[in-house]
Image (cartoon, rainbow, N blue to C red):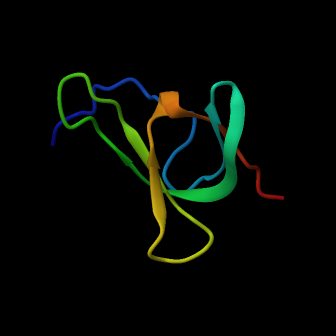
Amino acid sequence: MSENTYEPDFDFEEGDTVLVRVRENGSIVVKFEATCTDISDPSGIGTSRKARFEMPFGVMNSVTICPYEAEFEVVEDD
């Protein structure tokens, strides 16, 4: 079994509920809360890890986001 040598790009893990804010030119263009379903390792040189979230409007809809493409905040369960 190989040990993961990558630095963590995300401050959350698979299964965490996360508030995601995607910005473009300094403005928030998308904001949603979703559970992280997968965090993938880089697939090649110069690539980043990616987090996958199921979108709330259907099981066939999901989005994959790199760490530099958005702001992430873990939502605490009460």
**Residue at figure coordinates x 61%, y 74% from the top left:** 57
Is residue 10 among what the camera can see? no
| Residue at the front extreme of this rendering | 25
16 relative to 57, above or below: above
Q: In this view of the protein, which residue sits in the foreground, 48 or 9?
A: 48
The quarter of the rendered structure image containing the C terminus is bottom right
Give the number of callouts. Answer: 0
Rendering quarter of residue 71:
top right
**Residue at figure coordinates x 55%, y 77% from the top left:** 58
Horizontal arrangement in the rendering, residue 53 relative to residue 42 (left or right):
right
Horizontal arrangement in the rendering, residue 5 relative to residue 50 (left or right):
left
29 relative to 69, above or below: below
Residue 24 in the image: state x and y as whole percent.
Answer: 61, 32
| Residue at the right extreme of this rendering | 78
**Residue at figure coordinates x 15%, y 43% from the top left:** 1
**Residue at figure coordinates x 71%, y 37% from the top left:** 28
Is residue 23 among what the camera can see? yes
Q: In this view of the protein, which residue sits in the foreground, 27 or 12?
A: 27
Residue 37 in the image: state x and y as whole percent.
Answer: 46, 59
